[in-house]
């Protein structure tokens, strides 16, 4: 008995790159699929994977390809680094966008002209994730970076704030804090 042919399902990984302002790096894609291991090749940025954010089930109709995409939140190793277009055949440019703008990009538009195109797995992730701030919230060993929904008291600012909060690690030498 012959086995029925089934479409192959690929598994991919997509990196969500955050900068210290809590913005997400979005590429002006020219129709390719990206994976976390290609961040350096595609942007010139060195990143560190911090946490698993979720998965999407993505069908690329025109290409006839089906992927399960795993999203990993990453941080940049150098906060002052700038993304470069290293593969111009795949990407027309890189933009840092806020979570609110990312949600707007993924929202259905009235006309094709109004729509900003996102990489399909990222669009699916934004549309299915109910708590993007929580999904992108991270705490690293060296730096604390989080996106808070609830207000909190910022000691340095002496006031109640909300939204993105970044605390660089204090530099230490021989157990003493450097200034």
Image (cartoon, rainbow, N blue to C red):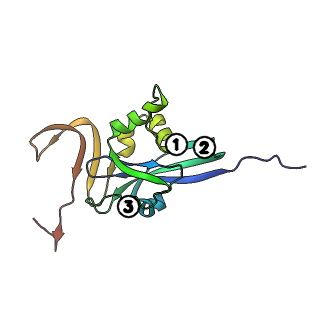
Answer whether residue 15 is visible to the viewer in this image: no
Q: Answer above or below: position of 151 versus 169.
A: above
Residue occupying image coordinates x 63% and y 42%: 62
In what element is the residue under mark 3?
strand
Residue 35, how many percent across, how many down? 50, 56
Image location (x, y in percent) of residue 78? 28, 62
Give the residue displayed 58% in from the left and 42% down from the top: 57
Q: Are marks 1 and 2 in contact (CB under 8 Å)?
A: yes
Foreground residue, 85 or 38?
85
Question: Mark number for residue 48?
Answer: 3
User: Are the residues flagged by discs 3 and 1 in contact, CB closer than 8 Å?
Assistant: no
Q: Position of residue 77 (x, y in %)?
A: 32, 63
- Tell me how far mark 1 sits from mark 2, CA to CA: 8 Å
Q: Which mark is residue 120?
A: 1
Distance between the alpha carbons at the discs numbered 3 and 1: 23 Å
Q: Say what secondary structure mark 2 lies in.
A: strand
Q: Sequence order check: which comes first, mark 3 or mark 1?
A: 3
N-term-proximal mark, 2 vs 3: 3
Provide the residue designation for mark 2: 60
Q: Which of marks 2 and 1 precedes in the sequence? A: 2
């Amino acid at each position: 008995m012959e086995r029925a042919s089934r479409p192959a399902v690929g598994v991919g990984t997509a990196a969500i790159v955050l900068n210290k302002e809590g913005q997400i790096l979005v590429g002006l894609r020219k129709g390719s699929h990206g994976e976390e291991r290609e961040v350096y090749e595609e942007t010139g940025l060195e990143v560190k994977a911090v946490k698993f954010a979720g998965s999407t089930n993505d069908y690329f109709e025109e290409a006839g390809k089906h992927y399960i995409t795993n999203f990993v939140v990453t941080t940049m190793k150098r906060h002052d680094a700038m993304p470069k277009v290293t593969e111009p055949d795949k990407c027309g440019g890189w933009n840092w966008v806020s979570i609110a703008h990312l949600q707007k990009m993924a929202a259905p538009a009235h006309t094709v002209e109004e729509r900003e195109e996102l990489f399909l797995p990222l669009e699916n992730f934004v549309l299915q994730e109910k708590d993007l701030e929580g999904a992108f919230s991270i705490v690293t060993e060296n730096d604390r970076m989080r996106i808070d929904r609830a207000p909190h008291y910022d000691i340095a600012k002496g006031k109640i704030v909300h939204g993105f909060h970044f605390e660089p690690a204090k530099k230490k030498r021989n157990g003493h804090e450097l200034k």
